[in-house]
Image (cartoon, helix red, strand yellow):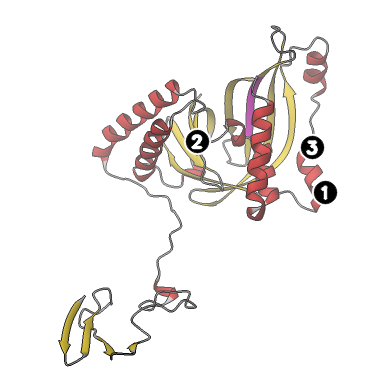
Amino acid sequence: FGLAINGGYVQVAHSFSPSSSSRWAISTSSHTQQQTSRLFSMPDDPYPSDYDADDLESTEKTVSVDMDEDDAAIRDELKRELILLASVTNRGMCASTEEENLVIDVVTQLEALNPTADPALNSQGDWELCYSSTQSFRSSPFFLAIRAFLGDDNEAMADNLFTIHDRATTASRVGKVRQIIDKNNQELVSEYDLSVGLIPGLPVRVKGCVVTTAELTATAPETWEMKVRGTKVNGSNVPFLDQYLDDNAVEVPVGEVYQAMSGSVPTAVLKTYYVDEGMRITRDIDDNFFVFTRA
């Protein structure tokens, strides 16, 4: 701000105005001080006074495409660092705050160097979870559907439910977590290997692979809309039950349950801001990110 004082009259040059030549006048006296209404936004004004709402740029994140071939070496180094951090933190489950911040920094840099146009249309194939910034089970369409069903107004409730589930399965061992995206980008299959202890202290564990299928629709270069279909358990080690489940393909029609309960199947939104021949980074509606490598 520049000030010029002449006999109790103050002229103020507002340095943040779109025009550097703008001037604002403030009249002062020993008892009162009047300020022009355009100097600052009033409390009931939802927008800064110097701008129209239409002039403000959207802060929504969009996918970028890096065409500079010289950046390939930088991407390779960042991916090596990310995979190393994933391995020493057990896919993020035991990451310290410092390690979490390092991963966030690396992921952000990789997303800015994304080499692939239309990531949502170029993510076909088999992927294995390498790192998760939240509970790994939240990458499954089953839990993504729960989050979408509860909506933004009940985000805290969803977080509490996921925390309760996480604590209830603390004694479980998570094996491979995979996603398979078909060549037409119309279906996602989630496979979650799990081993659960029946009795604490005894080496008796129930094993199985929770398989969840979902319908995929690409709605933007980086965006999928996903609707859960069904969930089943494969490869159980429980005698007789394993053969029954495998032979009869028993599946819970989760999508139909939602349809009957609420009249529609909840739509989960996923956004992929980075994909190349060996790595994919996808974010959910809460901006949690899941890093996958080619299986």
Amino acid type at mark 2: Ser
Amino acid type at mark 1: Met
At 82% from the left and 22% from the top, the residue drawn is 248
Please provide percent x and percent y for residue 254: 77, 39
Bounds of the magenta segment: 189-194
Q: Mark 1 vs mark 3: give the one in front.
A: 1
Helix, strand or loop under label 3 = loop
Considering only order in the chain, which callout, 2 or 3, is on the residue closer to the N terminus? 2
Quadrant in which the N terminus appears: bottom left
Please provide percent x and percent y for residue 221: 48, 50
Which residue position is annotated with label 3? 253
Which residue position is annotated with label 2? 133
Of 171 and 288, the residue lying toward us: 171
Crowd tier of the residue under label 1, counting other residues whose Cα lies within 10 Å: few below 14, some 14–19, many 20 or above: few
Please provide percent x and percent y for residue 216: 62, 44
Q: Main secondary structure of the magenta part?
A: strand
Considering only order in the chain, which callout, 3 or 1, is on the residue closer to the N terminus? 3
Please provide percent x and percent y for residue 183: 56, 36
Give residue 261's mark: 1
Q: Quadrant of residue 49?
A: bottom left
Helix, strand or loop under label 1 = helix
Image position of 126 with respect to 17: above or below: above
Helix, strand or loop under label 2 = loop
Q: Mark 1 vs mark 2: give the one in front.
A: 2
